[in-house]
Structures are given as C-alpha cells and as structure tokens.
Image (cartoon, rainbow, N blue to C red):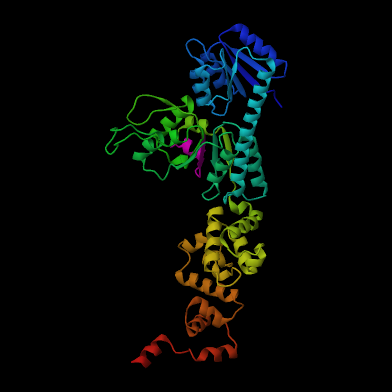
C-alpha cells in the first residue's frame, strides 16, 4: 500500500522544510510548495490525502486555496496553519470546510495527531463511498447474469477497466444489456458517487440533439427562453453514456470529437468553451468499421471512442445462461416464486424457452417471462402461457422471423398454436377448447382438417356441440 500523500503549502521556505522533515520521519510522502497557485496545480496533477496550508499568503491566500481544493476534491481534509489560535480567518476556514486549524508554533505531537485524524477521516469517507457503491449494486434489480465463456470475458474486462478513465465502446445486438454494462462500469469506478447520465442518440431528433447534449444559451433559437445545461454538464464529474452512437449525424460527430480531444464543449448560441470532466462510454448495435468504410461515421471519432472495446455476445450464443436469467426474472416478476425454475415452469414450456433463438436477446426473454407470469392460470407457466412464436417447437426455423415472414400463412400460425395448446394439456380437447376460447365443435372440425384423430368417447363428448354456427343461426330463426 502506498504511503499517504501530504501537501504542504506555506510561503515560508523554512516552514515547508520543517514540516516536510517532521512528516517524512513518520513515513508520509510529502510535497511542499510555496504558493496557493502551485498547490492547485499539484492537486490537479495528483490527488493528496491531506493538505496543510498557511492562511496568510500573497496572491492566493489560505481561504481562497481552501475553496479551490474543495472544488477539485471536496473530500480532501485541509488543516489550516495560523499565527494566532484565535484568528478570525482560521475560524472562517473551518466554517468553509477545513478539517481543523493549528497554531504555527504548536508542538510536533499536535501536528502528528491532527494529520493522523485527518487521514482517518479521509479513509472513513472513502470506505463509506465504497460501501454505498456495493450496497447500490447488491440491491439493484438490474444485475449482470451469466457464467458462460463469453460473459466471463466481459466480467474480466470490466475488472480491468472500471477504475480507469478510459473511453469505452460497447457493441452488441439490441437487448444484450449494453446500458447495464455501462452502469456497472460507472458503479465500480471512482466516479460512482457522481452522476450517470444515459442518452439514446437515435431517439432524439437531429435538430435537438446538439442542444440536448451540449446545452444552449437563452435566445439561441426559437423557444430557447432560458439557458439549458445539456446532458454533458449534467454528467459533470461522472459518466455520460451515449447509446446508439452510430445514429449521430456528422455535424454532431465533429463536436463529440472536440469534446473528447479538448475536454470542452460549446453550448448552442455561445462562443465560449466550457471545460468538462466526465467519462464517456458509448454503445452501438451497428458495425462501426463498416460505417467508417462507407463514410457514414468519422474515422477519427471512431478511433477516439474505440479505446477499450467490449463486445456483448447474443443470447443464442450463451444458452447455458438462459436458466440463470430465467431464475432472475422469475424472482422479479413472480410473487409466489417457489425457488427454482423447474418448480414453476412446465417441462414443455422450459423446452420451448431453451429452443427459441431469442433475436431480441435478454430484453425479449425478460418480456416473455413477465408476460407469462401475468397471464398464467396455474402454479406453473405452461406452453400456452408463452407467445406462440416461442411455444411452437416444430415451426420451421423456430422463431419470430418465420411467423413474420412471407412464407407462412395465418392459417398455419393458427394450426401450430392449436396443436401446441393441445400438446400442453396432454391432448385433452375440452380443456384445450376452453383455453382457446372456442366451441369444442369448432376445435373438433379443425382437428379433423389437421388430420388429428379422436376416440369414440371424445366424439360422444363433443357431439352435443356439433351444430355448426350456420345451424345455430337457422335454429334461432
């Protein structure tokens, strides 16, 4: 573990030397400067665990320095040195957030005790932030679920990059959880106690995107009746997540490039640059290499965004994770969840869920589980509770695409659905008719058309309903 870093600020060189020798003997890493301006420069370059500063200094005094330090890092404890214990400026400093103040000619032990206590405070605050981050992550309903090879590679990458400030590009199909990965990286970073602002670039009209991102000045366009900070300034100190970055027009791409290169933005209607301190994470379901090759996306911006790439695997390539995801979503959406997937999902329904190719990925799986939990009638989710495109196991190619394509008729969809329902109730035709909400005689005629045979008992049971709809109309007349 690195030695605690102490910054000493005093315009008297002898005082800097005295405190440096005193504290270095106790094992601290000490830096001494003689002006408040140099102190702020040192703070911006590297964080310090404690700052000890004189109050009376030329150009930038101790009170002004204290305000600057708190702007850079509000959690840094500052010990003020004053020539007189009752000096009003020292009391003012404490009111402004200084940890404590000491008389310049106090005993060595008093200085050492003050530094140790300030360090203990700093450590406690850091631990509180870490604990809060862990609790937030633990109690969040949104969690990264999966133990497949592909997901383990993602976890390993998150471990490596979360604590850095590197720009990240997350790629993957829609519904794979790109925003969840971005939030996880933020929650595990040093910026966890600062804002996380997520924007879907494809959902904001091009005419509004610039002002929404970078803000605007009052009167800069029709309807701009007041200043607006924009998402970048709202994320100051934290993380901005730009989803569907591939949807941004060229004009916005140029300004995003400037923000990444210069760490500054220009609100619409102003010519004054505003410095920004934020981490940028972007995501897309497009192939940006292809977009660059076809001149739809700027190559220089792509290279700036693609510092750390993370590719999320589609759900169909990690089928071993489906039961884990189902367990997670059942716990979320089933109030009487018994504890295991097998206890609340029938075997045929589970088989259908495992066979389906999930073009909508994890998001689609959650929607199907939530829907099934709501409409189920028994204690278990049955095939009939699933959408027809998931429940029908023998549909060629399996999946929504075939149902929506041009090569399957509405009659075939109906046939597949009826047979799936019949199979889910063990061939019991009366129960199947009740679930389908059709007359048993209607079901019987359809089954005959499908080539499904019935027993004599079933035919007798259904005979009372064998009048066709036309027959009923004739009788009623």
Judging depth in this view, the residue of 284 and 196 nearest the camera is 196
Q: Residue at x 52, y 74 (%)?
A: 418
Q: Residue at x 48, y 26 (%)?
A: 261
In the image, residue 302 above or below residue 287: above
Magenta-colored span:
280-296
Q: Quadrant of the C terminus?
A: bottom left
Q: Position of residue 6 (x, y in %)?
A: 63, 19
Image coordinates for residue 351, horizontal then vertical, percent: 63, 65
Image vertical order of residue 439 relative to residue 219, above or below: below
Q: Position of residue 262 (x, y in %)?
A: 46, 24
Q: Quadrant of residue 108?
A: top right
Q: Is residue 96 visible?
A: no
Left or right: residue 182 compared with residue 272: right
Q: Is residue 91 magenta?
A: no
Position of residue 362 measured from the top left corner of the image (x, y, whole percent):
56, 53
Q: Residue at x 57, y 51 (%)?
A: 141
Residue lying at the far front of the rendered structure = 86
- Horizontally, residue 353 falls left or right of residue 262, namely right
Q: Is residue 304 left or right of residue 228?
A: right
Residue 416 visible within the image: yes
Residue 295: name its quadrant: top left
Outermost residue, left direction? 222
Task: Work out whether residue 388 or residue 162 is closer to the camera in this orientation and state it.
Answer: 162
Give the quarter of the figure containing the N terminus: top right
| In this view, 444 is above or below 344 | below
Q: Using the image as rendered, state which of residue 257 and residue 42 is in the foreground.
A: 42
Q: Name the image quarter holding residue 311.
A: top right
Between 26 and 109, the one lying in front of the other is 109
């Amino acid at each position: 573990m690195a030695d605690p870093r102490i910054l000493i600020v005093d315009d008297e060189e002898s005082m800097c030397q005295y405190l440096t020798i005193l504290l270095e003997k106790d094992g601290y890493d000490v830096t001494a400067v003689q002006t408040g301006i140099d102190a702020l420069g040192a703070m911006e370059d590297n964080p310090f665990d404690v700052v000890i500063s004189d109050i009376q200094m030329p150009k930038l005094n101790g009170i002004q320095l204290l305000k600057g330090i708190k702007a850079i890092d509000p959690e840094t404890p500052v010990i003020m040195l004053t020539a007189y214990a009752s000096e009003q400026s020292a009391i003012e400093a404490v009111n402004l957030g200084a940890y404590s103040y000491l008389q310049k000619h106090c005993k060595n032990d008093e200085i050492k005790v003050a530094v140790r206590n300030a360090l203990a405070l700093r450590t406690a605050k850091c631990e509180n932030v870490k604990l809060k981050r862990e609790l937030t992550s633990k109690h969040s309903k949104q969690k990264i679920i999966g133990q497949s090879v592909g997901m383990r590679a993602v976890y390993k990458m998150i471990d490596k990059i979360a604590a850095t400030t590197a720009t990240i590009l997350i790629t993957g199909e829609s519904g794979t959880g790109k925003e969840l990965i971005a939030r996880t990286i933020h929650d595990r970073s040093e910026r966890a106690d600062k804002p996380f602002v997520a924007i879907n670039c494809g959902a904001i009209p091009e005419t509004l995107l610039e002002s929404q991102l970078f803000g605007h000045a009052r009167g800069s366009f029709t309807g701009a009746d007041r200043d607006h900070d924009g998402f970048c300034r709202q994320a100051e100190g934290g993380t901005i997540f730009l989803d569907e970055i591939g949807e941004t027009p060229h004009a916005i791409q140029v300004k995003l490039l400037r923000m990444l290169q210069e760490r500054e933005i220009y609100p619409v209607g102003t010519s004054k640059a505003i410095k920004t301190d934020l981490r940028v994470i972007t995501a897309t379901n497009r192939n940006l290499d292809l977009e660059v090759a076809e001149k739809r996306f700027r190559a220089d911006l792509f290279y700036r965004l693609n510092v750390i790439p993370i590719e999320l695997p589609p759900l169909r390539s990690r089928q071993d994770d489906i039961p884990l995801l189902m367990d997670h979503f059942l716990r979320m959406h089933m109030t009487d969840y018994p504890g295991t997937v097998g206890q609340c999902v029938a075997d045929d329904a589970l088989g259908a869920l495992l066979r389906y190719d999930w073009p909508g990925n994890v998001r689609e799986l959650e929607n199907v589980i939530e829907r099934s939990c709501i409409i189920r009638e028994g204690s278990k989710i049955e095939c009939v509770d699933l959408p027809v495109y998931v429940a029908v196991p023998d549909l060629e190619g399996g999946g929504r695409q075939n149902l929506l394509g041009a090569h399957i008729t509405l009659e075939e969809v109906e046939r597949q659905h009826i047979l799936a329902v019949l199979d889910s109730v063990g061939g019991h035709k009366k129960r199947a008719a009740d679930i389908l909400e059709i007359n048993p005689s209607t079901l019987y005629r359809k089954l005959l058309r499908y080539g499904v045979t019935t027993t004599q008992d079933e035919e007798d049971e259904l005979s009372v309903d064998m009048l066709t709809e036309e027959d009923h109309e004739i009788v009623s007349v």
